[in-house]
Image: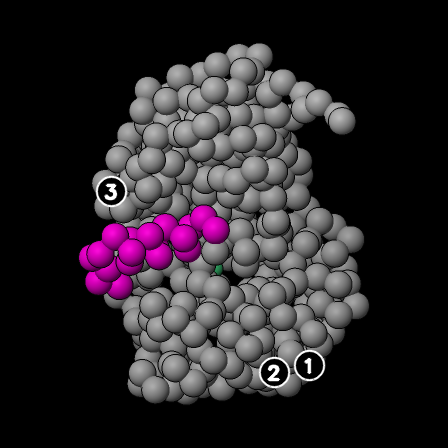
Amino acid sequence: MSRRPTPDVLFRNLRLGDGTPSAIAVSGGRIAAIGADAEAVSATSVIDLGGALVLPGFVEGHIHLDTSFYGDAWQPHVPCTAGFDVRERVAIQHGNMAAAAPMDQRARNQLELCITNGSVEMRSHVMVDASVGLKSLETIAAVREQYCDLINIQLVAFPQSGIVTCPGTAELLHAAFDHGADVIGGLDPASFDRDVKGHLDVVFGIAEKRGVPVDFHLHEPDMMGVSSIEEIAARTRALGMQGRVAISHAYGLGDVATDTVRRVANVLAKADVAIMTNAPGARAFPPVLALREAGVTVFSGSDNIRDSWWPYGDGDMLGRAMMIGYRSGFLTDDELEVAFDMVTANGAKALGITDYGLEVGASANFVVVKAAHIPEAVVAVPKPRTVYRYGKCIVRDGVLQR
Ligand SMILES: [Zn+2]
């Protein structure tokens, strides 16, 4: 019979999500034991957390590391001339980016903001189009390397300027997977490219050829959005890609009647297509509870932070859970836990991360805050945070340790 090695660290005198007093033993960067009984485990070193709440590391499921001006000069928001228009906004963005600090510097600022707030997993969309080519992707991939000891980052090759209507983009998207991309993105196949079949042929063609997951930006409203969602779900099932496709925003689901939401939710659940929402501003967004009840994975992300789209955002996924709860009218403890799931376990599921969570065998990645339990943490959004990655302290009281 083999003997288990002595754990490297025992974290004691802590609370788990429901407020239960507990301890966590970490061996080789993974959780070796967890629960009240773990208090008795002997370990090489012991860390007393003083009764603080320990939460699984947060999952930042949708962000843009290439376009933020966080830490750079303030960029006043420039409104579109005749109501929101994606093409006009992209043109405004091009002008702003040309005058901004170097991209790698801005990306590092934003990344450190997210890490000190407790994110341990991230999916960043990075623009790939005929004007920027693969330059942004290469820059962000290099920044990812510099932070690989602090956070895991998936990069999405994101066709911000469309595919069918932006000649050369399809070839660039194919090539992106030799330059650091992990996920293929898409953008409003009906309203932007006005060619749903053509757009999805390229996106799913790359997904199939490269064996990579898919994550669409879908801002299309009402039944136009619903129709695109159904097309995406049908392609997902046809290719056997269940569990590997996400739709970000899916605004249409916030616009249509409850019975339509219910019907589409079942379509999404059958295709195991996840929905990302960040509870955006004054915009109607997908009804979280109705989707979850049907079995849809719903997760979240900061999306834009201090960029050409809006000035808001703070890279805090616990704060994001609060915003989702606030805008969804969540009041009960169960509902607040739903919001919390969206920035933790459901995010991990949508991103295909398997060694996640506060359980034996998972990576020992967790955030320590002052709160009694998860519902209180969601509404109070306590700071500063202390963050452990593979059992090692990487952020102490909000300050990066490197
Ligand atoms: Zn986005």
Compared across the picture, whether 345 is left or right of 323 comes to right
Give the label on residue 376, or none: 3
Dividing the picture into quarters, in which one does residue 216 lie?
A: bottom right
Badge 3 density bin: few <14, some 14–19, many ≥20, Cα 10 Å: some
Does 307 sit above or below residue 85?
above
Residue drawn at point x = 67 percent, y = 21 percent: 5
Dividing the picture into quarters, in which one does residue 395 lie?
A: top left
Could you tell me which secondary element the residue under label 2 belongs to?
helix
Residue named by callout 2: 234
Compared across the picture, whether 287 is left or right of 354 comes to left
Residue range (magenta): 327-345
Residue named by callout 1: 238
Q: Disc 1 marks which amino acid?
A: Ala
For the residues labelled 3 and 1, say whether their Cβ atoms are less than 8 Å apart: no
Q: Earlier in the sequence, mark 2 or mark 3?
A: 2
Compared across the picture, whether 305 is left or right of 139 comes to left
For the residues labelled 2 and 1, say whether their Cβ atoms are less than 8 Å apart: yes
Residue drawn at point x = 24 percent, y = 59 percent: 330
Q: Disc 3 marks which amino acid?
A: Glu
Seen from the viewer's position, the closer of residues 254 and 350 is 350
Seen from the viewer's position, the closer of residues 130 and 26 is 26
